[in-house]
Amino acid sequence: MYIHLDCNNFFVSCELVSRPELKGTPVVVANDNGNNGGIILALNQEAKAVGLKRGNPLFQVTRLLEQHHVTVIDVHHHMYHEVSHHIMDEVRKTEMVLNFIQYSVDEFFGEMPEDDPTQLCTYLQTLKDLILRETGIPVSCGAGLTYTLAKTATWFAKHYPGYKGICIMPADKRESALAQVPVKDVWGIGRRSIKTIERQGIKTALDYTRQPEAWINKRFGVTGLRTWKELNGTPAITVASHERQKSIMYSRTFARMTGSKTVLLRELSNYASSATRKMREQQSLCRTVTLFLATNRHREDLPQYFADDTIKLSTATDDSTQIIHAVTQLLDRLFRENYQYKQAGVILGQLQHSDAVQLDLFAPDQAQKQAKQKRLMQAIDGINQRFGRNQIHFAVQGTEADTSEQPAGFMRPHEIV
């Protein structure tokens, strides 16, 4: 059967690993800029219980935060990616899961050659216990005959405490389970389709499965038809190609620390270039660029500093020039003198398919400019693929021979997708 693992309140759970004294109290993670100008990105159950929601602007819920003594923690994207990578490593080491795939920073799919619900539940409990023990992150698990049914099973595991974080959906329980799932909560049914679906009187996932195949195909195309087949128990989705990775991170822990802004800019530009090339390979565009810097937390004799920040682009792009420019702006914001930096990285987020880009209404010539830049990026990628990596690159990236001020250990960055 197919399995799905979903980390519970992932950002908050990551933060609570290092701050266990906050467990049982309301906690939110936000991109707080220090002036209540950020929004809530994640929150635990205690924070939800007092009326907070993901997406709340901080300035609008200041009274709730103060009244219920809610702890607001600034977001640390690089840490969440590292924890996610750790979870994948631990699960793979068990060799219990086939075709284990990271779908997003906090979600994973795989397969288990086991149909017996009792035995499958035992295996999933073993994985849950392992992940909690090794990373401190609680997860919910689902299993079903398809990826969509497995993810739907996880929906039950999260919404009904009686499942204790694990829900198995065998074939004979499929219809009764789908009758309880609102169609808007079905993975693969987009917000644009919901109004059309609800106008037809379709309220549950089971209602959706009972529509004629031709009707589904006519109104919702290939994507809607794949979801219909999956809900009916027929595998129709390949996760690796169905939806591309939602974020790409390149980072590096340096063998020697550096306090040079020039060196950081050179290396971060290389990271941005590598991440953007990877993004183009999977035909994606990004809407956000995040940069983080960190000193060596093990050197208590030195001043400590950590910071990250994000720029949201006006239009999704795969243009290296725009992304490197964003990285330059972010480094100007975050860099502080008199610190020795041990780690740095770039994260490209909110990835979407390159065919689905929405252009800026107030930039009428944007389409032509994008087409020109696309041809340029294709030419650079083609030349580098033929003659070797970085044969053509941006000046800010430096060269392989440029070792001025470069600390030992600056090598090819570590990639997490």
Image (tube, rainbow, N blue to C red):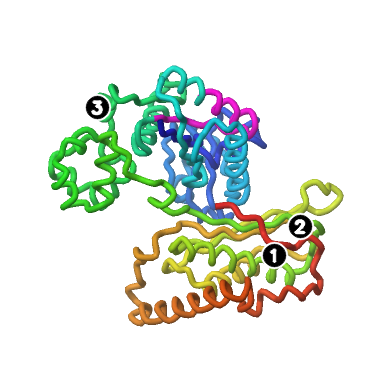
Mark 3 vs mark 2: which is more N-terminal? 3
Distance between the alpha carbons at the discs numbered 1 and 2: 17 Å
Amino acid found under the numbered disc labelled 3: Glu
Please indicate, yes or no, whether residue 402 appears anywhere in the rendered image.
yes
Residue in the picture at 25% in, 24% down: 176
Of marks 3 and 2, the one in the foreground: 3
Amino acid found under the numbered disc labelled 2: Phe
Mark 1 vs mark 2: which is more N-terminal? 2
User: Looking at the figure, which quarter contains the N terminus?
Assistant: top left
Mark 3 vs mark 1: which is more N-terminal? 3
Q: Is residue 173 above or below residue 18?
A: above
* Numbered mark located on residue 335 in the image: 1
Dot 1 crowding, Cα within 10 Å, few <14, some 14–19, many 20+: many
* Percent position of residue 302, x then y: 84, 53
Q: Secondary structure at mark 2?
A: strand
* Percent position of residue 182, x then y: 26, 35
Amino acid found under the numbered disc labelled 1: Phe
* Numbered mark located on residue 175 in the image: 3
Distance between the alpha carbons at the discs numbered 3 and 2: 54 Å
Q: Label 2, on which residue? A: 254
Residue in the picture at 45% in, 51% down: 57
Inspect the magenta stretch and tell me whether residue 413 lies in it. Answer: no
Q: Which residues are magenta?
A: 125-143
Residue in the picture at 70% in, 65% down: 335
